[in-house]
Amino acid sequence: MNKQDLLKDYKKQEDKILLAQVLDKIEFVQGKGKLEYTDFLDMYQISLVESFLKKNKFENYKLYGGYKEAERKILIIYPDKYDETMLEKNYPKMLKVIRVKLPEEEHGKYSHRNYLGGIVKLGLKREKVGDILVSDDGADIIVIADFTEILKKELPSLTRFENSKIEIMKLVDLRKKEIKIENIKIIVPSLRLDNIVSDLARTSRSKASQIIAQERVFINGQNETKVSKQIKLHDIITIRGKGRFIIKEFEGTTRSGRQVIVVEKYV
């Protein structure tokens, strides 16, 4: 395996570092016959890694975040002898859940930003933390298994959580967030991505172009930076920091020729 040849087409240093780490894990797995996995990857990293592995025809991998709809996921590299059942048996060894149970008087007080902000404030590594599933009475935080004791110990040092009950839970006990969908309509000049993002993110077209250039937009799980990309029926569009949307129906055009689109928005 010639790493330099495999990485020569990637310009960004952080991309090369991540992909080199993936190649190191592949070498280890192929040499030792043991399973390996990364820390949590964000949506851009997932798109990058999956594209890289497919391009190089490597099939023995799994992206997993603790539940089906997870946005942040770990990359699991496994030897040929592993099947899906063997992988599933290893999930509890890789990931656990930190449950924050708020006192009754603080129910509904904190958002995803409050929990993530607390973790960052403590100086803890973001890549050790997956999705944070917030409910009225607290949150379930998916974490790398060997990180759970540290997080359980440090969270109560934050004023906002000093009266909360912090528990380590098994992955099977994860309280999945109920997915709510709202139908909205947008009217755009064309099906170009920048037009769609502008309406969905409620911003100007120039700002939408910046969001796309910042690699914050994903179509069907793949990062997209081309502003002129044409959107199709049933495309799933994720805008980091703004939400996830499904193109549900093309309802027709207005008298001025603008497109009317029905969109399902995850809320």
Image (cartoon, rainbow, N blue to C red):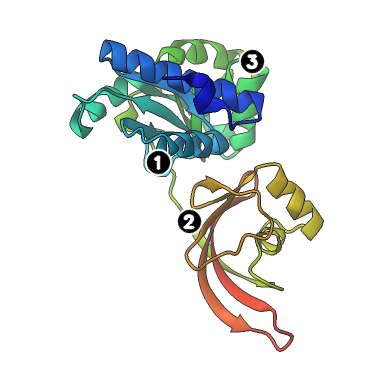
Which residue matches tag 3?
122
10 Å crowding of disc 1: few (<14), some (14-19), many (20+): some
User: Which mark is drawn over residue 192?
Assistant: none
10 Å crowding of disc 3: few (<14), some (14-19), many (20+): few
Query: Nearer the N terminus, badge 3 or badge 1?
Result: 3
Q: Is residue 184 left or right of residue 234?
A: right
Q: Residue furthest bottom?
A: 255
CB under 8 Å between discs 2 and 1: no
Q: Picture coordinates of residue 259 (x, y %)?
A: 64, 77
State whether residue 36 is above or below residue 221.
Answer: above
Query: Nearer the N terminus, badge 3 or badge 2?
Result: 3
Residue depicted at x 59% and y 29%? 115
Question: Which amino acid does the dot numbered 2 rest on?
Answer: Lys
Q: How far is disc 3 from disc 1 in space, using C-alphas? A: 25 Å
Q: Picture coordinates of residue 235 (x, y %)?
A: 50, 61
State whether residue 85 is above or below residue 22.
Answer: below
Which residue matches tag 2?
180
Which picture quadrant has residue 255? bottom right
Question: Which amino acid does the dot numbered 3 rest on?
Answer: Leu
Which quadrant is home to the N terminus?
top left
Total of numbered circles in the picture? 3
Q: How far is disc 3 from disc 2 in space, using C-alphas? A: 32 Å
Res 166 visible = no
At mark 2, the secondary structure is: loop
Q: Picture coordinates of residue 226 (x, y %)?
A: 66, 53
Residue depicted at x 69% and y 79%? 258
Q: Nearer the viewer, residue 60 or 111?
A: 60
Q: Is residue 178 left or right of residue 202?
A: left
User: Which mark is drawn over residue 176?
Assistant: 1
Question: Which amino acid does the dot numbered 1 rest on?
Answer: Lys
